[in-house]
Every structure is written in structure tokens, then in C-alpha cells.
Amino acid sequence: MNYNEIYFGNKQMTPPNKEIALSETSEGLIYTLVKLEAGRDLKEKISSMGLNSGAHFKIIANSGHGPVGLEVRGSRLGIGRGMSGKIRVIEIEPK
């Protein structure tokens, strides 16, 4: 468990503007991609999915195992645990 995580009831929350891995995100929240800790091939694959630096997306599924489901630019994607651990994001405030 990350010592920076805060718990409210059953919901795990991350402090604002704290960079985390995509695999650590919470369902229903909106995040933005800040960096990829990956090689060229994975960066190209992620970019082809519409996930570029600064892209905003909503987490639609993250049970802690299996792929992370997200919605970006009107499309739904599933990203495996291995890849999602290399994608760094921050939570953004809803407008």
C-alpha cells in the first residue's frame, strides 16, 4: 500500500496532483497522462490508442487485477496490468 493513499469509507483516493501509475487509479475518476516509462514500441502503441501526453480520460474499470478499462476521446480501451504500470498519470479536478 502506498503511504500517500487516503481512504474514505471503501473508496481509495490519491492526493491531488500526485503522480501514480495507471494501474493504481480509481474507477469513475478523471486523469491526465503525464509520462510513459516505456520503450519506443510501447510508446508508439499507447500513442496509437489516443493516449498522448496531456490526454484526459475516465477510468471505467479497475478491479486491481486484469486490464484497466478507460474511456478516452469517446472510445473505450482495455490496457493490461503490465502496460498500465508504465503509464504515469495525475488525477484532475472535474470542471
Image (cartoon, rainbow, N blue to C red):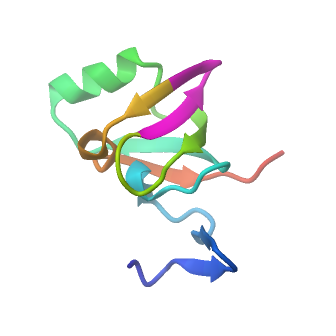
Q: Residue at x 42, y 30 (%)?
A: 78
The answer to whether 43 is drawn above or below residue 69 in the figure is above
* Quarter residue 15 falls in: bottom right
Residue lying furthest right: 95
Residue 55's x, y, as percent? 55, 31
> Could you say which is closer to the camera, residue 3 or residue 68?
68
Range drawn in magenta: 68-76
Q: Residue at x 60, y 40 (%)?
A: 60
Residue lying furthest bottom: 3
**In which quadrant will I find the N terminus?**
bottom left
Residue 32's x, y, as percent? 56, 42
In the picture, measured across the screen, residue 46 lies left or right of residue 54, that is left
Residue 46's x, y, as percent? 34, 26
> Could you say which is closer to the camera, residue 8 or residue 38?
8
Whether residue 55 appears in this view of the structure is: no
* Quarter residue 51 falls in: top left
Indicate whether residue 38 is drawn in magenta: no
Whether residue 72 appears in this view of the structure is: yes
> Could you say which is closer to the camera, residue 54 or residue 26?
26
In the picture, measured across the screen, residue 95 lies left or right of residue 34, that is right
Residue 47's x, y, as percent? 37, 21
- Our reading of the magenta stretch's main secondary structure is strand
Q: Residue at x 35, y 45 (%)?
A: 66
Q: Residue at x 17, y 23 (%)?
A: 41
The answer to whether 18 is drawn above or below residue 50 in the figure is below
In the picture, measured across the screen, residue 16 lies left or right of residue 52, that is right
